[in-house]
Image: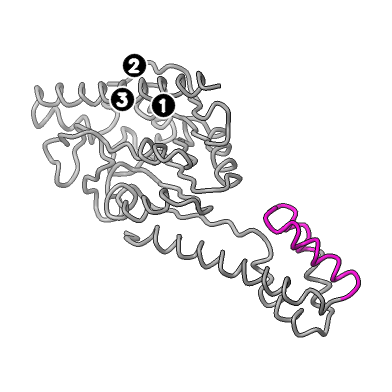
Amino acid sequence: LFEDNAEFGYGIALGNIVMKNKIYNLIYDNINEFKGKIKEKLKEFLENFEEDKKREELSKEIVPLLEESNNPIAKEIVELKDYLEKRSIWIVGGDGWAYDIGFGGLDHIFANRENVNILVLDTEVYSNTGGQSSKASQIGSIAKFTASGKKTNKKDLAAIAMSYGHVYVAQVSMGADYNQLIQAIKEAEEYDGPSLIIAYSPCIAHGITGGMTNSQEQEKLASLCGYWPLFRFNPTKENKLILDQDEPNWDLYHEFLNNEKRYAMLYAVNKEKAAYLLEENKKAAIGRWNYYKKLAELYEKEN
C-alpha cells in the first residue's frame, strides 16, 4: 500500500538537496586548489548552480576533467558526480494511498515548495488489496464496504492541491487524450515546485463490459461524458487553469455508468436506489465541471 510513499519520496528529495549543497560547498571552498580549464569550468558551474539545464551541460564537461586530475578534491567531487545534474523525483502510487491512508504525507508535500512530482494512478478503489471502496470512489459505486452503493461523493484531490496556489496540478487520461497526458508530464517535470498528476486508471474491479481490452475506449467515454474532466493548472502561466476538452456530452453519462458493473450491479440490489444514486453521480460530475469551468474563467479575468 506504500503508506509512507510520500514521506519516503520527500525524504529522497530532501536528501538530494543536502548532497547538492555538499557539492556546491566542496567546490566553493576548494576552487583555488584547481588551475586552468578545470578552475574556469568549476567557477562557471558555481555561477550557474541554480540553472538546471546549464548545470547539466557543464557537468558533462567537468566530470572528464576531474577524472583525469590527481587532486584529492577532484576525486571527492567525482564520487558525488550523480548529484552534479538535476535529479528528477517522482512519487507514484494509487488512490487508496493518495486519497486515504497516505494523504497526510501528500498534503505535507503540497504545503512546501520542494521540487517533487507525484503521479496518482486513480482506479477509484483499493485495487491492490481486493477492491475496497476509497475516498476516491464515486457515489453509487459498488465495492467492498459499499455493497449497496457508496453514499458520498468522490474527494476532489485536485481542488485541494490547487487551493495552495503553488502546486502544479493536472488531471489526465491516456485513453481520452494521449497528447494531453504527455504535455502534463512534461510541464510537471519542468515546474520548479510540487506537482500532482491524477491519471484515470481503469481497473478489473470496474467490471468494464467486454473486459479490460475496452479500457481505452471507456477512458475516452469517461471524459466525453464529463465523468473525468481533463485539465491542467500551472501557477506560472497567465491563464493558470486550462480545460483540455470541450463541453461534455451529458447525454452519454449513463451509457458510461452502465458499461461498468460497479455501477450497473446497483440496479439488481435496488432499482429505485440505483436510479437515485447514479443520478446524484451525474449531478456531482456536472457540479465539478461547472466549478472548474468557472474557476478557469476567473483566472482568465485576472489577466
Q: Which residue is mark 1?
A: 223
- Work out how far the residue at label 3 is from the one at label 2, CA to CA, in angstroms: 9 Å
Up/down of 39 relative to 242, above or below: below
Residue in the image at 40% along x and 46% along y: 121
- Give the secondary structure at mark 2: helix
The image shows residue 239 at horizontal and vertical percentages of: 55, 26
Query: Is residue 266 a member of the stretch shown in magenta?
Result: no
Q: Residues within 10 Å of mark 1 (few under 14, many from 20)?
A: many
Where in the figure is residue 51, as x and y percent of width and height?
70, 53
- The stretch in magenta equals 35-60
Q: Secondary structure at mark 1?
A: helix
Between the C-alphas of marks 3 and 1, the distance is: 11 Å
Determine which quarter of the picture holds residue 133.
top left
User: Residue 187 — which label?
Assistant: none
Q: Which residue lies at the image location 91% right of the left edge and 72% below the top edge? A: 36
**Which residue is the site of mark 2?**
250
Check the image and tell me how it is coloured: one colour
Q: Is residue 54 magenta?
A: yes
